[in-house]
Amino acid sequence: MDSLGRNGLFGQAALEHIDALYGYAMTLTRDTTKAEDLVQETYLRAAGAANRPDNGNLKGWLFVIMRNAWLNQVRHENSGPHFVDLDNESPIDEVQENPHVVYLRNLEREQVRQAIGSLPDAYREIVVLRDIEGFTYQEIATVLDCPAGTVMSRLGRARGKLRKLLSGRKNKTRIRAV
Amino acid sequence: MEGTATFKNCEDIRGRLTLYLDDELQGEERATIEAHLSECESCAAIFARELGFLKSVRESGPLHVASPELRTKIEGLLSERQTSSPIPVAEAKQSLVGPRRRFGWLVAAAALLILLLPVVVWRMTRRTDTSPIKRPSGFALMAADTHLRRTRGQLPLEMESASPQDISAWFSNKVNFQVKLPNYQESSGQEKLYTLEGARLVGFQNDYAAYVAYRMGDRPISLVITSESAAKPSGGEEIAARGLMFHYNAIDGLKVLTWSDRGLTYALVSDLEERGQQSCIVCHTGTKDRDFIEPLKPH
């Protein structure tokens, strides 16, 4: 039995990740009710699990449970996964010496959030996992059940798209300001 | 930084800046980039720009915060689970430490359900065996717990259907074995003694097991299926029939029968009473199931 087995520490440790899990649930579902249901389903499954990871892997393990639970729901609704395969999309032009990037440092938090929220599902998910939740490439690969190389390429495209969105928003702000 | 060799070096460095910024580089690789950035203004400028961008993204979190109501619910759920059943009921489909394994085919779970239901019920209420009863297996305990959660309304079905074909199809690509539920009504020509309600996945041994919900009148019946490599039937009263060994346990007032056949392990759970069970036998002894049922009856 691991350190978080049946000794009561599991509940305390798992609860520390509730905001992260809810954020990920919102990323997946874009709906507060569905997100709360998904969080509950995740904790229910985790609480009943026989083999729990050690504390260092707990967060990733919970995210794996959540994503699988969500995929099951999507399959159940016969709508298919909402994620579109974006890995084969044409590469987005890298921002080279783009002066707008400089402004990003001063963008309001909400502006960045809105930009993340307007990313395509697969891009939004990987940005959240890496840049908001701080997972490593390998941990993300485990959560998404894909190769680490796919994580790298998808993350690069997602950030490229995010740069463009933020740059565009900044341009509009500047135009309005003028 | 000028010259072909140097330019190539800059290109290499810039190509790995993202890995560096994401803390994916270690040791010498990391030191090489840091040394280069300290010497190359051009690369250092790109690095600073990328760092600023990532910083603005990373500082935008958390994007959402759980409501106090949700937090309270989860606290209650975790507290309840800690103080109640120690039985594993659900686990992650994949762990962080290993790939999924593929199991071979299989098979007619519901056929066995139909064939064995009268026998199970009959045996459950007529245990005259005086030999010591061994402890139920973990799989049997999990199946009993799953059944209880279902009856309490804590385990919603992920798909609802009375069609064996639809449910069989739903399980494809979700579990590492094939679930093929037969259509009893079609195969027997008799009136159905039970209804099929639907299905869902339940966790067991770091993978998913298949859960199928039936109902006989107002009494729920649960069938849980997993691979034989994940669970081997054991414990309880052993009943041999048709080359198979069935294990019967009474768990928390439930009757649980487990058995393995052709690579899969099944658990059948119900709280059916004797009268209902006897009715099943009456119905089934006149059918083609009779040959299967008869040898299982106690002598």
Image (cartoon, rainbow, N blue to C red):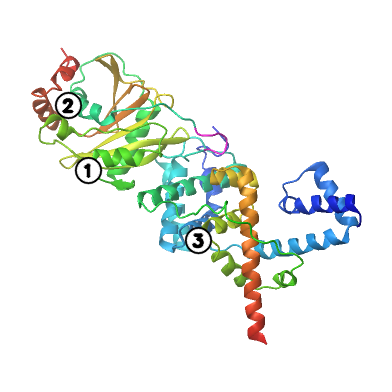
Query: CA–CA distance between discs 3 and 1?
Result: 37 Å
**Where does the N terminus of chain B fall, quadrant-wise?**
bottom right
Q: Which residue is mark 1?
A: B162
Chain bearing mark 3 = B
Residue A10 seen in the figure:
yes
Magenta range: B95-100
Report the front residue among B189 and B160: B189
- Left or right: B297, with A85 as reference point: left
State which chain disc 2 sits on. Answer: B
Question: Which residue is the extreme one toward the bottom?
Answer: A178
Q: Which residue is mark 2?
A: B118
Indicate which label's residue lies in the foreground, 3 or 2. Answer: 2
Q: Secondary structure at mark 2?
A: helix
Residue B34 appears at what percent x and percent y? 84, 52
Chain ID of residue with mark 1: B
Residue B185 spot, x, y in % from top left: 15, 35
Compared to B155, does A172 lie above or below?
A: below
- Where is residue B252, by image quadrant? top left
Residue B66 got which mark?
A: 3
